Image: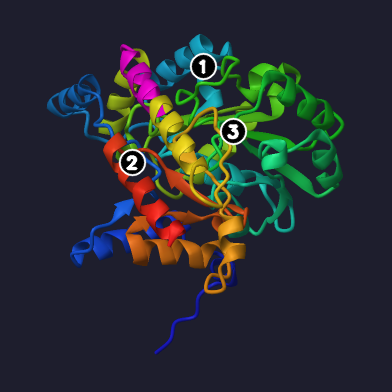
Amino acid sequence: MSVNTSERVAKVKPSATIAVSMKAAELRAAGRDVLSLSAGEPDFPTPEHIGNAAIAAIHNGETRYTAVDGTPVLKQAIKNKLQRDNQLSYEANQILVSGGAKQCIYNLLAAAINAGDEVIIPAPYWVSYPDMVRLVDGEPVVITTGPQQSFKVTPKQLRAALTDKTRLIILNSPSNPSGKAYTRAEYQALGAVLADFPNVVVVSDEIYEHIYWGSEPFISFATACPELIDRTVVINGVSKSYAMTGWRIGYAAGPAGLIKEMRKVQSQTTSNPCSIAQAAAVAALDGDQECVKVMNRAFHERHDLFVKGLNELPGVECLPGEGAFYAFPSFQAVIDARDDIADDVELAGWLLETVGVATVPGTAFGQPGHLRLSYASSNEDLEEALKRLRQALSA
């Protein structure tokens, strides 16, 4: 017997990054030697003081339901963080804690989007943005950028894409997958365009904020464009900066009315995020930040090593990034030179099968001809991956 499923879900593709990670795990289980450069998570352990806070919370009996939008102590820690790091002031009713930044974004889309509303998404984009828009019956409007403009949307492109149906724009800096970050001046130029479209909400995904080494200090969109703060939602969390991907704590800060509706969505889907993980997040945000600096330095060193090595491969071109832990090189010249490989999807499959290097096709990020490679791995693994890639591409 077949079961009918919704047309809404039929429009959605499974996450490409998760699919590649699962394929790599299957090959490993079968005895294959696979180096996975597909994972979107730090390879460091969660810092000890954060884990100890979680253990203490268990011993203290903090194992019951919390408020849907997060414990008061965690919301205060988030307020402190936003003021300390971003010079942004929020009240408790302007903050929502969720089971990861991903849930925050979905809550926002569910609360703000009606059928047919348009959401502008610059490409390359994080793989989940367009499909989350489709899940709430919205229409993703993709603006294609490219290496010639550092994978960042221009004011001219943005103005051309905005219509009466535009409800949201999603900006991600530093970017997954490109590692590129917007400057204050670039945000202000985009803000000048958005000022003419008062019904458009800006979603600023800043989950990689503390994995950053740009020449200018990191800047939040809300900090760069304070005149738009009443229609900006800042998305962040503890997953990447504190090596806490499995703890599933993200947060949103924005207009109280919109946060209220997002809280309503969460109350009818998951209720509160994990109480123990919330206690750990307090320790992360309020505690010593030296652990963040240590991990950031390691990622920066790996970036320099890996991007240099990629650019030495035949047919590969890779722009340096300013943050996150991904390289996003173009393999188009490699694809064009081979009769047996039609596109980046086939190339990723060929590299996995022939030399055991797992990557994610750029098509999944809206940028064909590229591959996303995570350097959240040891220097030894990265050097081995470069060796294998060189072997494959030189054959």
Q: Which residue is label 1 attached to?
A: 82
Residue 381 horizontal side relative to residue 15, left or right? left
Q: CA distance from mark 2 to mark 1?
A: 37 Å
Could you tell me residue 158's position as x and y percent? 80, 40
User: Residue 296 lies in magenta, yes or no?
Assistant: yes
Are dots 2 and 1 in contact, CB under 8 Å? Answer: no
Q: Nearer the viewer, residue 359 or 394?
A: 394
Mark with earlier residue (3, 2): 3
Which amino acid, by three-letter code, is at mark 1?
Answer: Leu
User: Residue 316 lies in magenta, yes or no?
Assistant: no
Note whether 84 is above or below 389 in the view shown: above
How packed mark 1 is, by other alpha carbons closer than 10 Å (few <14, some 14-19, many 20 or more), is some
* Helix, strand or loop for the magenta stretch, by majority: helix
Note whether 218 is above or below 260 in the view shown: above
Note whether 149 is above or below 85 in the view shown: below
Q: Which residue is label 2 attached to?
A: 383
At x 62% / y 53%, what residue is drawn?
367
Question: In the picture, residue 221 is in which quadrant?
Answer: top right
The circle on residue 147 is: none
For the record, the magenta segment spans 287-299
Mark with earlier residue (2, 1): 1
Q: Nearer the viewer, residue 339 or 3?
A: 339
Q: Which residue is label 3 attached to?
A: 180
Could you tell me residue 234's position as x and y percent? 58, 28
